Image (cartoon, rainbow, N blue to C red):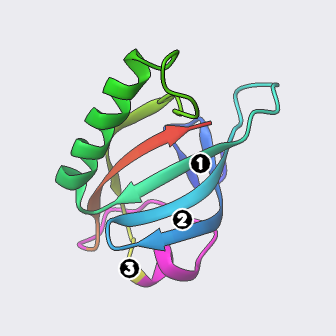
Amino acid sequence: MPSNTILDKFVIGKPLDSGEYGRVFQAKDITSKNSTKYVIKLSEQYENLAHEIKVLKKLTKIKEQVQGVPTLVDYGIILLKNMVRADLDKCTTIPEPEISQSSRLFGYYIIP
């Protein structure tokens, strides 16, 4: 399993964008044979991300009335170990997990 894998399912790809509330990366589902492209948003400000997730969930309920709303594939809070801010800014991979003091909680969600 690649070291840049989250939830033993999604491999984190190249960074797509970043902002005040997180970073967005390409992601690939390694457990599926379909070619659906995914993105994953990671944020240390998981409380703010929770609000964003709530809005996406509400919009999903009225999806047939609102065009262009992505479907949440997964969301939650994960512990990324040996992660530093610079890694999210410039890296395309997440370091191999180890027990360390630099472990951090990140909120995440994945959409197609």
Rendered image: mark on residue 85: 3
**Do the residues bearing badges 1 and 3 touch, measured as CB atoms within 8 Å?**
no
Residue 28 is situated, as x and y percent measured from the top left of the image, at 69, 43
Q: Would residue 24 appear left or right of 81 to someone viewing this image?
A: right
Name the amino acid type tagged 3: Arg
Q: Would residue 95 appear left or right of 32 to someone viewing this image?
A: left
Please tell me whether residue 97 belongs to the stretch shown in magenta: yes
Name the amino acid type tagged 2: Ile
Q: Main secondary structure of the magenta part?
A: loop
Residue 60 image-quadrant placement: top left
Residue 73 visible, this angle:
yes
Q: Earlier in the sequence, mark 3 or mark 2?
A: 3
| Discs 3/2, front | 3
Q: Over which residues does the magenta segment extend?
A: 86-101
Residue 36 image-quadrant placement: top right
Q: Earlier in the sequence, mark 2 or mark 1?
A: 1
Is 103 above or below relative to 4?
Answer: below
- From the image, tell me which residue sits under label 2: 94
* Residue drawn at 21 percent across, 54 percent down: 48
| Discs 1/3, front | 1
**Do the residues bearing badges 2 and 1 touch, measured as CB atoms within 8 Å?**
no
Is 13 above or below relative to 111?
Answer: below
- From the image, tell me which residue sits under label 1: 39
* Residue drawn at 52 percent across, 15 percent down: 64
Other-residue count near label 3 (Cα within 10 Å), few / some / many at <14 / 14–19 / ≥20: few
Residue 102 is situated, as x and y percent measured from the top left of the image, at 28, 73
The answer for how far apart the CA atoms under marks 3 and 2 are is 11 Å
Q: Would residue 34 appear left or right of 91 to someone viewing this image?
A: right
